[in-house]
Image: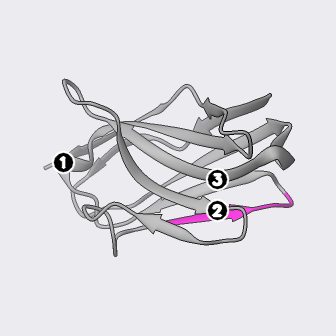
Amino acid sequence: QVQLVESGGGLVQAGESLRLACAASGSTVSASLWGWYRQAPGKEREFVSSMSSWGSTMYAKSVKGRFAISRDNAKNTMYLQMNSLKPEDTAVYYCHARTDRAVDYWGQGTQVTVSS
């Protein structure tokens, strides 16, 4: 089992930055893929970014160049640095982990609201 707890969401104005954190506990050594997803009101949950256990990263087109994913293995914490935020980035952001047996774990989500 992997437990994930997000933090760092909030209300910001367009153009500002936020850093989300995802603290992981439990059988984290079994996770081979870490990532962030988001869900806006009335929309389906969508992929934002991911990082493999060997450091390979991926980004959605809508955030590439503005967001950066990172991980501090010593702290078992993953981050999402979000710069140049836009109103369309408003959503609940979820931390995700997938084990090497393809079991998915999710955090409870943290709200990010960007005002224009």
Tally the marks: 3
Badge 3 or badge 1: first in the primary sequence: 3
Give the amino acid at mark 2. Ser
Q: Which mark is residue 69?
A: none
**Which segment did they paint magenta?**
68-74
Badge 1 or badge 2: first in the primary sequence: 2
Give the amino acid at mark 1. Glu
Q: Position of residue 50 (x, y in %)?
A: 52, 58
Badge 3 or badge 2: first in the primary sequence: 3
Q: Residue drawn at (82%, 45%), measured in percent from left and top?
A: 30
Q: Quadrant of the N terminus?
A: top right
Q: What separation in Å lies between label 3 and label 1 (alpha carbons)?
A: 26 Å
Q: Residue drawn at (56%, 41%), measured in percent from left and top?
A: 95
Is residue 40 placed above or below 32 in the rendered structure? above
User: Regarding mark 1 in the picture, which secondary structure is present there?
Assistant: helix
Give the amino acid at mark 3. Leu
Residue of label 1? 88
Disc 3 vs disc 2: Cβ atoms closer than 8 Å? yes
Residue of label 2? 52
Is residue 45 placed above or below 14 in the rendered structure? above
Residue 73 sits inside the magenta stretch: yes
Left/right of residue 2 with respect to residue 114 in the rendered view: right
User: Regarding mark 3 in the picture, which secondary structure is present there?
Assistant: strand
Residue of label 3? 33
